Image: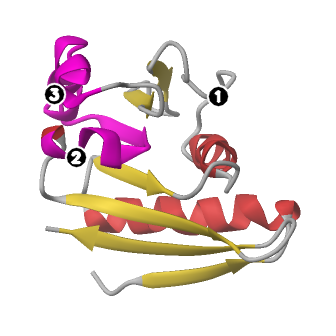
Amino acid sequence: MTPITLEIPNLAAVPTAAQQLATALAESGQPIVAFEGEMGAGKTTLIRALCAALGVEDDVSSPTFALVNEYRDGRGLPIYHFDFYRVDSEEEAARLGAAEYFDSGYLCLVEWPSHVAGLLPPQRLLVELAVTGPESRLLTINSEQ
């Protein structure tokens, strides 16, 4: 996949970027999406908009303390949303069953993937969010192998 770079000038542009991400996701065929970005970059905001683009009707929020939230897309298929910020080790994530989710074949949206890098499949979509201003972001979508 050729890397895709999108400028997000403000919060109002996030749904459009999420729709483009949904298209890239469908084209890639990758069920694992790793979201990288500093604290406050907007990973959860982007995931919320992506889930809306995929037909999720549930309230999408950060699973910071639960570690994983499950939603259903417009076709009734599960989407797993992880936040590994508070995970102390890959072993802790493994004990919580992260690998089973990653091997499920269902869409897994992973915030703070560097905290569980050894558990993630080598093939995945990488979404990087860089803060460029108070509301502006630079979004890069690339596949890792």
- Asked if residue 60 lies left or right of residue 83, the reply is right
Q: Position of residue 62 (x, y in %)?
A: 61, 28
Other-residue count near label 3 (Cα within 10 Å), few / some / many at <14 / 14–19 / ≥20: some
Q: What whole-number distance in Å separates the C-alpha atoms at marks 3 and 1?
A: 22 Å
Distance between the Cα atoms at labels 2 and 3? 11 Å
Q: As drawn, is 121 to the left or to the right of 31?
A: left
- State which tag comes first along the sequence, 2 or 3: 3
Q: Amino acid at mark 3?
A: Ala
Q: Residue 126's spot in the image, x, y percent?
A: 36, 63
Q: What residue is shown with label 2? A: 117
From the viewer's perspective, is residue 31 above or below residue 38?
Answer: above
Q: Residue furthest front?
A: 88
Q: State which quadrant residue 41 falls in.
A: bottom right
Under mark 2, the amino acid is: Ala
Disc 1 designates what residue?
Answer: 60
Numbered mark located on residue 80 in the image: none
Residues drawn in magenta:
89-118
Q: Earlier in the sequence, mark 1 or mark 2?
A: 1
Label 2 vs label 3, nearer the camera? 2
Kindly give the residue lying farthest to the bottom in the view shown.
2
Q: Is residue 67 found inside the magenta-colored segment of the image?
A: no
Q: Depth check: 114 or 145 in front?
A: 114
Which residue shows up at 56% across the image and 69% down it? 20
Reading the image, the residue beneath label 3 is: 99
Q: Nearer the viewer, residue 92 or 119?
A: 92
